[in-house]
Amino acid sequence: MSTTNPAPRRRTYTTEFRQGLVAQCQPGVSVSRIALAHGINTNLLRKWIDRYRNQLPASVSAEPSKLVAVQVELPVKAQTEAACTEPIEISLTKRTTHINIRWPGNQAQACATWLSAWLK
């Protein structure tokens, strides 16, 4: 008497299951680890990634995000006035030269110009 084993049946997975695994495959996450954790072959998961990568759930893609312009008013004038009255103090070392500079705060642009030229 001869016995024949029936051919093994392939497992089937729902689309939701497949898309759920693909969603877990973010940059920096091991595809192999996700596949092994769910008992599937890594190559199969990679095929699903290729197939479902650009598909988003309807709830996510239904409404695009909107950018909203926001205007914030800062008390710039008060800060600028306070900064102008205080002197700019800089301590520099270039090779063997050590310089301590105390520059009037209301001449910040002139200080920046001089400093740029000196550091070249």
Image: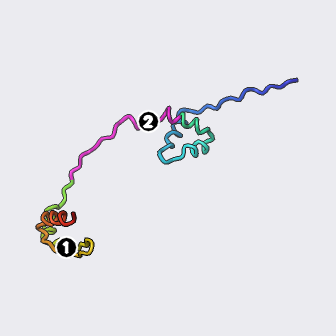
Residue type at mark 2?
A: Leu
Vertical order, 54 against 108 (above or below): above
Mark 2: secondary structure:
loop
Asked if residue 99 lies left or right of residue 2, the reply is left
Q: Can residue 78 be seen in this view?
A: no
Residue 70 in the magenta stretch? The answer is: yes
- Residue at x 21% of width, y 75% of height: 99
Judge the density around disc 2: few (<14), some (14-19), many (≥20) Cα neighbours within 10 Å: few
Residue, disc 1: 89
Q: In which quarter of the image is the C terminus?
A: bottom left
- Residue ranking furthest to the top: 1
Q: Do the residues labelled 1 and 2 touch (CB within 8 Å)?
A: no
Asked if residue 102 lies left or right of residue 30, the reply is left
Residue 47 in the magenta stretch? The answer is: no
State which tag comes first along the sequence, 1 or 2: 2
Residue type at mark 1?
A: Glu
Which mark, residue 56? Answer: 2
Would you say the magenta stretch is mainly helix, strand or loop? loop
Q: Give the range drawn in magenta.
A: 48-71
Vertical order, 13 against 116 (above or below): above
Q: How many labels does the image show?
A: 2
Q: Can residue 76 be seen in this view?
A: yes
Residue 36 placement (x, y as % from top left): 61, 44
Judge the density around disc 1: few (<14), some (14-19), many (≥20) Cα neighbours within 10 Å: few
| Quadrant in the picture for residue 110 | bottom left
Residues 16 and 44: in front is 44
Residues 66 and 103: in front is 103
Asked if residue 109 lies left or right of residue 17, the reply is left
Mark 1: secondary structure:
strand
Residue 49 placement (x, y as % from top left): 51, 36
- Residue at x 58% of width, y 44% of height: 32
Vertical order, 84 against 68 (above or below): below
